[in-house]
Protein backbone atom coordinates (compact mmCIF):
# COMPACT_ATOMS: atom_id res chain seq x y z
CA UNK A 1 0.00 0.00 0.00
CA UNK A 2 2.88 2.36 0.77
CA UNK A 3 4.33 1.99 -2.73
CA UNK A 4 0.95 2.66 -4.29
CA UNK A 5 0.48 5.75 -2.11
CA UNK A 6 3.87 7.14 -3.04
CA UNK A 7 3.28 6.41 -6.73
CA UNK A 8 -0.05 8.17 -6.46
CA UNK A 9 1.56 11.24 -4.93
CA UNK A 10 4.42 11.13 -7.45
CA UNK A 11 1.94 11.37 -10.28
CA UNK A 12 -0.31 14.01 -8.81
CA UNK A 13 1.85 15.80 -6.25
CA UNK A 14 1.72 19.16 -7.98
CA UNK A 15 -2.03 18.99 -8.48
CA UNK A 16 -2.72 17.83 -4.95
CA UNK A 17 -0.45 20.52 -3.52
CA UNK A 18 -2.20 23.24 -5.51
CA UNK A 19 -5.64 21.92 -4.69
CA UNK A 20 -4.79 21.61 -1.01
CA UNK A 21 -3.53 25.17 -1.05
CA UNK A 22 -6.69 26.38 -2.78
CA UNK A 23 -8.98 24.48 -0.43
CA UNK A 24 -6.93 25.61 2.55
CA UNK A 25 -7.20 29.25 1.52
CA UNK A 26 -10.92 28.77 0.99
CA UNK A 27 -11.28 27.17 4.40
CA UNK A 28 -9.45 30.01 6.15
CA UNK A 29 -11.38 32.63 4.17
CA UNK A 30 -14.72 31.00 4.92
CA UNK A 31 -13.80 30.65 8.59
CA UNK A 32 -12.87 34.33 8.75
CA UNK A 33 -16.12 35.34 7.07
CA UNK A 34 -18.15 33.02 9.27
CA UNK A 35 -16.74 34.47 12.48
CA UNK A 36 -16.64 38.11 11.37
CA UNK A 37 -20.08 38.17 9.76
CA UNK A 38 -21.89 35.94 12.23
CA UNK A 39 -20.41 37.27 15.44
CA UNK A 40 -19.60 40.91 14.74
CA UNK A 41 -21.27 42.39 11.64
CA UNK A 42 -24.60 40.66 10.98
CA UNK A 43 -27.48 39.58 13.19
CA UNK A 44 -28.61 35.93 13.10
CA UNK A 45 -31.56 37.00 10.92
CA UNK A 46 -29.32 38.83 8.43
CA UNK A 47 -26.85 35.96 8.34
CA UNK A 48 -29.71 33.52 7.79
CA UNK A 49 -31.11 35.62 4.92
CA UNK A 50 -27.67 35.79 3.30
CA UNK A 51 -27.25 32.03 3.20
CA UNK A 52 -30.91 31.43 2.45
CA UNK A 53 -30.32 33.49 -0.69
CA UNK A 54 -27.16 31.56 -1.54
CA UNK A 55 -29.12 28.32 -1.17
CA UNK A 56 -31.86 29.59 -3.49
CA UNK A 57 -29.22 30.66 -6.01
CA UNK A 58 -27.69 27.20 -5.68
CA UNK A 59 -30.98 25.62 -6.70
CA UNK A 60 -31.38 28.06 -9.61
CA UNK A 61 -27.87 27.17 -10.79
CA UNK A 62 -29.19 23.73 -11.70
CA UNK A 63 -30.83 25.32 -14.72
CA UNK A 64 -27.75 27.34 -15.64
CA UNK A 65 -25.62 24.20 -15.76
CA UNK A 66 -27.75 21.10 -16.48
CA UNK A 67 -24.65 18.91 -16.11
CA UNK A 68 -22.97 20.68 -19.02
CA UNK A 69 -19.79 21.56 -17.10
CA UNK A 70 -18.79 18.01 -16.20
CA UNK A 71 -19.94 16.68 -19.56
CA UNK A 72 -17.71 19.19 -21.35
CA UNK A 73 -14.83 18.33 -18.99
CA UNK A 74 -15.31 14.62 -19.68
CA UNK A 75 -14.91 15.18 -23.45
CA UNK A 76 -12.00 17.57 -22.87
CA UNK A 77 -10.32 14.79 -20.88
CA UNK A 78 -11.00 12.31 -23.69
CA UNK A 79 -9.94 14.42 -26.66
CA UNK A 80 -6.78 15.85 -25.11
CA UNK A 81 -5.45 12.28 -25.13
CA UNK A 82 -6.25 12.05 -28.86
CA UNK A 83 -4.20 14.95 -30.15
CA UNK A 84 -6.63 17.69 -29.11
CA UNK A 85 -7.96 18.41 -32.59
CA UNK A 86 -11.55 18.55 -31.42
CA UNK A 87 -10.89 20.41 -28.16
CA UNK A 88 -11.74 23.81 -29.61
CA UNK A 89 -15.09 22.50 -30.81
CA UNK A 90 -15.81 20.88 -27.43
CA UNK A 91 -15.10 24.17 -25.65
CA UNK A 92 -17.16 26.22 -28.09
CA UNK A 93 -20.18 23.96 -27.69
CA UNK A 94 -19.86 24.05 -23.90
CA UNK A 95 -19.46 27.82 -23.68
CA UNK A 96 -22.24 28.65 -26.13
CA UNK A 97 -24.83 26.53 -24.36
CA UNK A 98 -23.65 27.60 -20.90
CA UNK A 99 -23.86 31.30 -21.77
CA UNK A 100 -27.43 31.00 -23.01
CA UNK A 101 -28.52 29.09 -19.92
CA UNK A 102 -26.83 31.51 -17.49
CA UNK A 103 -28.41 34.60 -19.05
CA UNK A 104 -31.88 33.06 -19.07
CA UNK A 105 -31.77 31.82 -15.47
CA UNK A 106 -30.23 35.02 -14.04
CA UNK A 107 -32.95 37.12 -15.64
CA UNK A 108 -35.63 34.74 -14.34
CA UNK A 109 -34.33 35.03 -10.76
CA UNK A 110 -34.15 38.84 -10.96
CA UNK A 111 -37.67 39.21 -12.37
CA UNK A 112 -39.18 36.55 -10.13
CA UNK A 113 -37.57 37.63 -6.87
CA UNK A 114 -40.86 38.78 -5.36
CA UNK A 115 -42.60 35.51 -6.14
CA UNK A 116 -39.69 33.49 -4.74
CA UNK A 117 -39.64 35.55 -1.54
CA UNK A 118 -43.37 35.00 -1.07
CA UNK A 119 -43.05 31.25 -1.66
CA UNK A 120 -40.34 30.98 0.99
CA UNK A 121 -42.34 33.23 3.30
CA UNK A 122 -39.53 35.79 3.74
CA UNK A 123 -40.43 39.13 2.06
CA UNK A 124 -37.07 40.59 3.09
CA UNK A 125 -35.39 38.31 0.52
CA UNK A 126 -36.31 40.61 -2.40
CA UNK A 127 -33.16 42.79 -2.52
CA UNK A 128 -30.98 39.81 -1.68
CA UNK A 129 -32.31 37.90 -4.69
CA UNK A 130 -31.73 40.85 -7.02
CA UNK A 131 -28.03 40.78 -6.15
CA UNK A 132 -28.26 36.99 -6.08
CA UNK A 133 -29.09 36.92 -9.79
CA UNK A 134 -25.72 38.54 -10.48
CA UNK A 135 -24.03 36.09 -8.14
CA UNK A 136 -25.64 33.21 -10.03
CA UNK A 137 -24.14 34.41 -13.31
CA UNK A 138 -20.57 34.85 -12.13
CA UNK A 139 -20.37 31.81 -9.84
CA UNK A 140 -21.74 29.61 -12.63
CA UNK A 141 -18.86 30.57 -14.89
CA UNK A 142 -16.28 30.30 -12.13
CA UNK A 143 -17.44 26.73 -11.55
CA UNK A 144 -17.33 26.07 -15.29
CA UNK A 145 -13.69 27.16 -15.57
CA UNK A 146 -12.69 25.09 -12.54
CA UNK A 147 -14.20 21.88 -13.85
CA UNK A 148 -12.73 22.47 -17.33
CA UNK A 149 -9.25 22.75 -15.82
CA UNK A 150 -9.92 19.48 -14.02
CA UNK A 151 -10.77 17.89 -17.37
CA UNK A 152 -7.44 19.13 -18.74
CA UNK A 153 -5.74 17.59 -15.66
CA UNK A 154 -4.49 21.08 -14.82
CA UNK A 155 -5.96 21.47 -11.35
CA UNK A 156 -3.25 24.01 -10.52
CA UNK A 157 -5.19 26.42 -12.73
CA UNK A 158 -8.41 25.56 -10.88
CA UNK A 159 -6.54 26.42 -7.70
CA UNK A 160 -5.63 29.87 -9.05
CA UNK A 161 -9.28 30.59 -9.80
CA UNK A 162 -10.40 29.35 -6.39
CA UNK A 163 -7.79 31.30 -4.46
CA UNK A 164 -8.72 34.50 -6.31
CA UNK A 165 -12.34 34.08 -5.29
CA UNK A 166 -11.63 33.11 -1.68
CA UNK A 167 -9.33 36.00 -0.85
CA UNK A 168 -11.38 38.60 -2.74
CA UNK A 169 -14.57 37.44 -1.06
CA UNK A 170 -13.27 38.26 2.41
CA UNK A 171 -12.07 41.69 1.36
CA UNK A 172 -15.15 42.82 -0.54
CA UNK A 173 -17.84 41.18 1.63
CA UNK A 174 -16.49 42.75 4.81
CA UNK A 175 -15.86 46.10 3.10
CA UNK A 176 -19.41 46.40 1.77
CA UNK A 177 -20.92 45.48 5.14
CA UNK A 178 -18.76 48.10 6.86
CA UNK A 179 -20.06 50.63 4.33
CA UNK A 180 -23.50 50.05 5.82
CA UNK A 181 -24.98 47.72 3.18
CA UNK A 182 -25.70 44.90 5.63
CA UNK A 183 -26.33 41.34 4.41
CA UNK A 184 -27.02 42.56 0.87
CA UNK A 185 -23.58 44.20 0.89
CA UNK A 186 -21.97 40.93 1.95
CA UNK A 187 -23.63 39.19 -1.00
CA UNK A 188 -22.46 41.96 -3.32
CA UNK A 189 -18.93 41.24 -2.10
CA UNK A 190 -19.43 37.62 -3.16
CA UNK A 191 -20.43 38.87 -6.63
CA UNK A 192 -17.33 41.03 -7.10
CA UNK A 193 -15.02 38.25 -5.89
CA UNK A 194 -16.51 35.64 -8.22
CA UNK A 195 -16.36 38.09 -11.14
CA UNK A 196 -12.63 38.58 -10.56
CA UNK A 197 -12.19 34.80 -10.46
CA UNK A 198 -14.00 34.49 -13.80
CA UNK A 199 -11.64 37.02 -15.39
CA UNK A 200 -8.64 35.05 -14.10
CA UNK A 201 -10.15 31.76 -15.29
CA UNK A 202 -10.84 33.08 -18.80
CA UNK A 203 -7.32 34.44 -19.12
CA UNK A 204 -5.73 31.19 -17.94
CA UNK A 205 -7.87 29.00 -20.18
CA UNK A 206 -7.00 31.02 -23.26
CA UNK A 207 -3.30 31.63 -22.66
CA UNK A 208 -2.34 28.33 -21.02
CA UNK A 209 -4.52 25.83 -22.89
CA UNK A 210 -6.71 27.03 -25.75
CA UNK A 211 -3.94 28.44 -27.95
CA UNK A 212 -1.66 25.43 -27.40
CA UNK A 213 -3.80 22.94 -29.31
CA UNK A 214 -4.12 22.73 -33.07
CA UNK A 215 -7.76 22.40 -34.01
CA UNK A 216 -9.57 20.47 -36.71
CA UNK A 217 -11.47 22.62 -39.17
CA UNK A 218 -14.53 20.40 -39.05
CA UNK A 219 -16.38 19.38 -35.93
CA UNK A 220 -16.94 15.65 -35.58
CA UNK A 221 -20.41 14.48 -36.49
CA UNK A 222 -22.56 14.14 -33.39
CA UNK A 223 -20.11 15.84 -31.04
CA UNK A 224 -22.63 18.41 -29.77
CA UNK A 225 -25.22 15.65 -29.35
CA UNK A 226 -22.81 13.46 -27.34
CA UNK A 227 -21.88 16.34 -25.02
CA UNK A 228 -25.52 17.20 -24.41
CA UNK A 229 -26.56 13.55 -24.01
CA UNK A 230 -23.88 12.84 -21.41
CA UNK A 231 -24.99 15.92 -19.52
CA UNK A 232 -28.40 14.31 -18.91
CA UNK A 233 -27.37 11.82 -16.18
CA UNK A 234 -25.01 14.45 -14.78
CA UNK A 235 -27.94 16.88 -14.65
CA UNK A 236 -29.93 14.33 -12.69
CA UNK A 237 -27.05 13.83 -10.27
CA UNK A 238 -26.43 17.55 -9.88
CA UNK A 239 -30.13 18.21 -9.39
CA UNK A 240 -30.36 15.60 -6.68
CA UNK A 241 -27.13 16.85 -5.10
CA UNK A 242 -28.47 20.40 -5.02
CA UNK A 243 -31.72 19.27 -3.48
CA UNK A 244 -29.67 17.40 -0.90
CA UNK A 245 -27.38 20.34 -0.05
CA UNK A 246 -29.50 23.44 -0.64
CA UNK A 247 -33.16 22.69 -0.17
CA UNK A 248 -32.65 21.77 3.48
CA UNK A 249 -31.47 25.32 4.24
CA UNK A 250 -34.43 26.75 2.32
CA UNK A 251 -36.83 24.50 4.23
CA UNK A 252 -35.30 25.48 7.57
CA UNK A 253 -35.71 29.15 6.67
CA UNK A 254 -39.29 28.66 5.49
CA UNK A 255 -40.44 26.39 8.32
CA UNK A 256 -38.38 27.66 11.27
CA UNK A 257 -37.35 31.23 10.30
CA UNK A 258 -34.15 32.97 9.15
CA UNK A 259 -32.44 32.72 12.54
CA UNK A 260 -32.80 28.92 12.48
CA UNK A 261 -31.41 28.95 8.94
CA UNK A 262 -28.44 30.88 10.32
CA UNK A 263 -27.89 28.27 13.04
CA UNK A 264 -28.12 25.48 10.50
CA UNK A 265 -25.70 27.25 8.16
CA UNK A 266 -23.16 27.68 10.95
CA UNK A 267 -23.41 23.97 11.75
CA UNK A 268 -22.93 22.93 8.14
CA UNK A 269 -20.04 25.33 7.60
CA UNK A 270 -18.18 24.16 10.68
CA UNK A 271 -18.41 20.56 9.47
CA UNK A 272 -17.44 21.61 5.92
CA UNK A 273 -14.15 23.15 7.12
CA UNK A 274 -12.79 19.65 7.65
CA UNK A 275 -13.27 18.37 4.11
CA UNK A 276 -10.27 20.16 2.55
CA UNK A 277 -7.87 17.16 2.27
CA UNK A 278 -10.54 14.75 0.99
CA UNK A 279 -11.92 17.25 -1.51
CA UNK A 280 -8.41 17.97 -2.77
CA UNK A 281 -7.55 14.29 -3.23
CA UNK A 282 -10.86 13.51 -4.92
CA UNK A 283 -10.73 16.51 -7.26
CA UNK A 284 -7.17 15.73 -8.34
CA UNK A 285 -7.32 11.94 -8.66
CA UNK A 286 -10.80 11.44 -10.17
CA UNK A 287 -9.79 11.94 -13.83
CA UNK A 288 -7.07 9.31 -13.38
CA UNK A 289 -9.61 6.52 -12.86
CA UNK A 290 -10.94 7.06 -16.36
CA UNK A 291 -7.44 7.24 -17.80
CA UNK A 292 -6.35 4.01 -16.08
CA UNK A 293 -9.52 2.23 -17.17
CA UNK A 294 -8.99 3.34 -20.76
CA UNK A 295 -5.47 1.84 -20.57
CA UNK A 296 -6.77 -1.42 -19.07
CA UNK A 297 -5.05 -0.73 -15.72
CA UNK A 298 -7.95 -1.75 -13.48
CA UNK A 299 -5.72 -3.02 -10.69
CA UNK A 300 -3.77 0.23 -10.55
CA UNK A 301 -6.97 2.28 -10.45
CA UNK A 302 -8.26 0.10 -7.61
CA UNK A 303 -5.08 0.50 -5.59
CA UNK A 304 -5.27 4.28 -6.07
CA UNK A 305 -8.83 4.28 -4.76
CA UNK A 306 -7.89 2.10 -1.78
CA UNK A 307 -5.02 4.45 -0.90
CA UNK A 308 -7.38 7.44 -1.06
CA UNK A 309 -9.92 5.72 1.21
CA UNK A 310 -7.23 4.74 3.66
CA UNK A 311 -6.07 8.32 4.03
CA UNK A 312 -9.54 9.78 4.50
CA UNK A 313 -10.57 7.17 7.07
CA UNK A 314 -7.40 7.74 9.06
CA UNK A 315 -7.98 11.51 9.04
CA UNK A 316 -11.73 11.88 9.25
CA UNK A 317 -13.02 9.31 11.72
CA UNK A 318 -10.84 10.81 14.51
CA UNK A 319 -11.62 14.36 13.30
CA UNK A 320 -15.36 13.71 13.47
CA UNK A 321 -14.99 12.19 16.92
CA UNK A 322 -13.13 15.25 18.13
CA UNK A 323 -15.70 17.60 16.61
CA UNK A 324 -18.47 15.78 18.44
CA UNK A 325 -16.65 16.19 21.75
CA UNK A 326 -15.60 19.85 21.50
CA UNK A 327 -18.68 21.28 19.76
CA UNK A 328 -20.46 22.27 22.96
CA UNK A 329 -17.94 24.80 24.27
CA UNK A 330 -16.47 25.66 20.86
CA UNK A 331 -19.61 27.15 19.29
CA UNK A 332 -20.28 29.50 22.19
CA UNK A 333 -16.62 30.48 22.59
CA UNK A 334 -16.14 31.25 18.88
CA UNK A 335 -19.52 32.60 17.76
CA UNK A 336 -21.11 33.82 20.98
CA UNK A 337 -24.10 32.80 23.06
CA UNK A 338 -26.54 33.82 20.29
CA UNK A 339 -25.43 30.77 18.30
CA UNK A 340 -25.62 28.22 21.13
CA UNK A 341 -28.51 26.53 19.31
CA UNK A 342 -26.09 25.54 16.54
CA UNK A 343 -24.20 23.20 18.89
CA UNK A 344 -26.51 20.23 18.40
CA UNK A 345 -26.42 20.77 14.63
CA UNK A 346 -22.60 20.57 14.67
CA UNK A 347 -22.66 17.42 16.78
CA UNK A 348 -25.09 15.67 14.43
CA UNK A 349 -23.15 16.86 11.38
CA UNK A 350 -19.92 15.36 12.76
CA UNK A 351 -21.14 12.02 11.37
CA UNK A 352 -21.69 13.71 8.01
CA UNK A 353 -18.00 14.68 8.00
CA UNK A 354 -16.97 11.02 7.64
CA UNK A 355 -19.58 10.27 4.96
CA UNK A 356 -18.59 13.36 2.99
CA UNK A 357 -14.89 12.46 3.07
CA UNK A 358 -15.57 8.99 1.68
CA UNK A 359 -17.88 10.44 -0.94
CA UNK A 360 -15.39 13.08 -2.08
CA UNK A 361 -12.83 10.45 -3.08
CA UNK A 362 -15.48 8.27 -4.71
CA UNK A 363 -18.23 10.19 -6.44
CA UNK A 364 -16.40 12.20 -9.15
CA UNK A 365 -14.38 9.12 -10.04
CA UNK A 366 -17.60 7.38 -11.05
CA UNK A 367 -18.30 10.12 -13.59
CA UNK A 368 -14.93 9.54 -15.24
CA UNK A 369 -15.52 5.78 -15.18
CA UNK A 370 -18.74 6.27 -17.14
CA UNK A 371 -21.04 5.39 -14.22
CA UNK A 372 -22.80 8.75 -13.98
CA UNK A 373 -26.20 7.19 -14.67
CA UNK A 374 -26.08 4.82 -11.68
CA UNK A 375 -24.86 7.60 -9.40
CA UNK A 376 -27.65 9.85 -10.64
CA UNK A 377 -30.29 7.28 -9.75
CA UNK A 378 -28.89 6.86 -6.24
CA UNK A 379 -28.62 10.59 -5.72
CA UNK A 380 -32.18 11.15 -6.92
CA UNK A 381 -33.58 8.65 -4.45
CA UNK A 382 -31.47 10.15 -1.67
CA UNK A 383 -32.55 13.71 -2.45
CA UNK A 384 -36.25 12.87 -2.41
CA UNK A 385 -35.83 11.03 0.88
CA UNK A 386 -33.94 13.99 2.35
CA UNK A 387 -36.70 16.45 1.41
CA UNK A 388 -39.36 14.19 2.94
CA UNK A 389 -37.40 13.74 6.16
CA UNK A 390 -36.72 17.48 6.36
CA UNK A 391 -40.41 18.28 6.11
CA UNK A 392 -41.12 15.74 8.87
CA UNK A 393 -38.26 16.64 11.24
CA UNK A 394 -37.82 20.42 10.93
CA UNK A 395 -41.18 21.44 12.54
CA UNK A 396 -40.55 19.52 15.80
CA UNK A 397 -36.73 19.68 15.94
CA UNK A 398 -35.74 22.75 13.92
CA UNK A 399 -32.23 22.93 12.50
CA UNK A 400 -31.14 19.77 14.33
CA UNK A 401 -33.91 17.84 12.57
CA UNK A 402 -32.61 19.01 9.20
CA UNK A 403 -29.11 17.89 10.16
CA UNK A 404 -30.36 14.43 11.16
CA UNK A 405 -32.23 14.06 7.87
CA UNK A 406 -29.11 15.02 5.91
CA UNK A 407 -26.86 12.57 7.75
CA UNK A 408 -29.26 9.65 7.44
CA UNK A 409 -30.01 9.97 3.74
CA UNK A 410 -26.46 10.92 2.74
CA UNK A 411 -25.11 7.83 4.49
CA UNK A 412 -27.20 5.57 2.25
CA UNK A 413 -26.05 7.48 -0.83
CA UNK A 414 -22.36 7.11 0.05
CA UNK A 415 -22.80 3.37 0.66
CA UNK A 416 -24.31 3.05 -2.82
CA UNK A 417 -21.42 4.94 -4.45
CA UNK A 418 -18.83 2.76 -2.73
CA UNK A 419 -20.71 -0.33 -3.93
CA UNK A 420 -20.70 0.93 -7.53
CA UNK A 421 -16.97 1.67 -7.33
CA UNK A 422 -16.41 -1.85 -5.99
CA UNK A 423 -18.37 -3.26 -8.93
CA UNK A 424 -16.28 -1.22 -11.39
CA UNK A 425 -12.82 -1.85 -9.90
CA UNK A 426 -11.23 -4.84 -8.08
CA UNK A 427 -11.25 -3.15 -4.67
CA UNK A 428 -10.06 -5.31 -1.75
CA UNK A 429 -12.91 -4.81 0.71
CA UNK A 430 -11.42 -7.11 3.33
CA UNK A 431 -8.36 -4.91 3.75
CA UNK A 432 -10.52 -1.80 3.90
CA UNK A 433 -12.69 -3.32 6.64
CA UNK A 434 -9.62 -4.12 8.71
CA UNK A 435 -8.33 -0.57 8.24
CA UNK A 436 -11.70 0.86 9.29
CA UNK A 437 -11.72 -1.28 12.45
CA UNK A 438 -8.27 -0.11 13.49
CA UNK A 439 -9.16 3.52 12.78
CA UNK A 440 -12.24 3.24 15.01
CA UNK A 441 -10.10 1.80 17.81
CA UNK A 442 -7.63 4.69 17.50
CA UNK A 443 -10.48 7.21 17.52
CA UNK A 444 -11.96 5.65 20.66
CA UNK A 445 -8.62 5.92 22.45
CA UNK A 446 -8.27 9.53 21.42
CA UNK A 447 -11.84 10.27 22.56
CA UNK A 448 -11.14 8.96 26.06
CA UNK A 449 -8.12 11.24 26.43
CA UNK A 450 -9.97 14.31 25.16
CA UNK A 451 -13.08 13.63 27.27
CA UNK A 452 -10.99 13.55 30.45
CA UNK A 453 -9.77 17.14 29.96
CA UNK A 454 -12.91 18.67 28.44
CA UNK A 455 -14.26 19.90 31.83
CA UNK A 456 -11.27 22.28 32.01
CA UNK A 457 -12.10 24.10 28.74
CA UNK A 458 -13.09 27.69 29.55
CA UNK A 459 -11.43 29.82 26.86
CA UNK A 460 -10.22 29.77 23.27
CA UNK A 461 -6.69 29.04 24.47
CA UNK A 462 -7.73 26.01 26.51
CA UNK A 463 -9.91 24.81 23.61
CA UNK A 464 -6.94 24.95 21.24
CA UNK A 465 -4.84 23.10 23.82
CA UNK A 466 -7.40 20.30 24.04
CA UNK A 467 -7.55 20.00 20.26
CA UNK A 468 -3.74 19.83 20.13
CA UNK A 469 -3.79 17.11 22.79
CA UNK A 470 -6.25 15.13 20.68
CA UNK A 471 -3.95 15.39 17.65
CA UNK A 472 -0.98 14.16 19.69
CA UNK A 473 -2.94 11.19 21.04
CA UNK A 474 -4.20 10.38 17.54
CA UNK A 475 -0.68 10.50 16.12
CA UNK A 476 0.77 8.29 18.84
CA UNK A 477 -1.98 5.67 18.58
CA UNK A 478 -1.89 5.72 14.77
CA UNK A 479 1.85 5.03 14.74
CA UNK A 480 1.59 2.38 17.46
CA UNK A 481 -1.19 0.56 15.60
CA UNK A 482 0.70 0.62 12.30
CA UNK A 483 -1.90 2.78 10.56
CA UNK A 484 0.52 5.66 10.14
CA UNK A 485 3.94 4.91 8.71
CA UNK A 486 6.23 7.79 9.63
CA UNK A 487 8.60 7.16 6.72
CA UNK A 488 5.76 7.03 4.22
CA UNK A 489 4.19 10.15 5.70
CA UNK A 490 7.48 12.05 5.41
CA UNK A 491 7.88 10.88 1.81
CA UNK A 492 4.35 11.93 0.91
CA UNK A 493 4.65 15.31 2.59
CA UNK A 494 8.01 15.98 0.93
CA UNK A 495 6.40 15.44 -2.46
CA UNK A 496 3.59 17.83 -1.59
CA UNK A 497 5.95 20.69 -0.71
Image: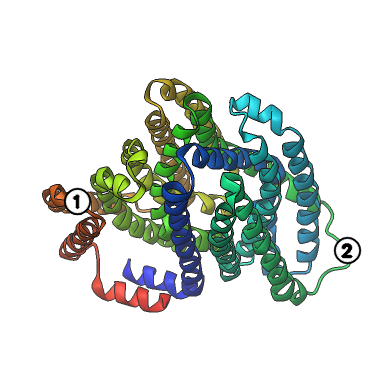
Relative horizontal placement of residue 450, taking residue 407 as reference (left or right): left
Residue in view at x 67 percent, y 56 percent? 144
Question: Can you give x and y, in whole percent of width and height, for residue 190 in the image?
Answer: 60, 54
Which quadrant of the rendered structure holds the N terminus? bottom left
Q: Is residue 3 above or below residue 96?
A: below
- Disc number lying in front (1 or 2): 1
Residue at 66 percent of width and 35 percent of height = 126
Q: Secondary structure at mark 2?
A: loop
Answer whether residue 251 is visible to the viewer in this image.
yes
Q: Earlier in the sequence, mark 1 or mark 2?
A: 2
Q: Is residue 478 left or right of residue 288?
A: left
Residue at horizontal 37%, vertical 61%?
307
Residue located farthest toward the right when viewing the structure as drawn: 217
- Where residue 218 is drawn, which disc sits there? 2
* Depth check, front residue: 439 or 456: 456
In the depicted structure, whether residue 472 falls above or below residue 496 = above
Q: Which residue is mark 1?
A: 458
Q: CA distance from mark 1 to mark 2?
A: 69 Å
Q: Quadrant of residue 58?
A: top right
Amino acid sequence: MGCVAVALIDRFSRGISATLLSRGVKMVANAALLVVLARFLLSPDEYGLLYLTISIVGVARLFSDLGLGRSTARYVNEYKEDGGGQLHHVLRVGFAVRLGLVIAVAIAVALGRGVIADLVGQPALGPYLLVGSLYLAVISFQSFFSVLFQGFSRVTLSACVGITNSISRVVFAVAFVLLGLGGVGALLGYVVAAALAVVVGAALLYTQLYVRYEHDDEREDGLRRRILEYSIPLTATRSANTLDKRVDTILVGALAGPAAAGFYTVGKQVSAFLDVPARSIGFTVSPAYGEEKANGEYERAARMYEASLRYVLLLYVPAATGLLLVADPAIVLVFGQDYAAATLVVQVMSIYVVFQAINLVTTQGLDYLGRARERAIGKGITAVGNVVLNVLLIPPYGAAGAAAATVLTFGFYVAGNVYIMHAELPVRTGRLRKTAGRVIAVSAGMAVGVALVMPHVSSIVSLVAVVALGVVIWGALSIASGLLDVGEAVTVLSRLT
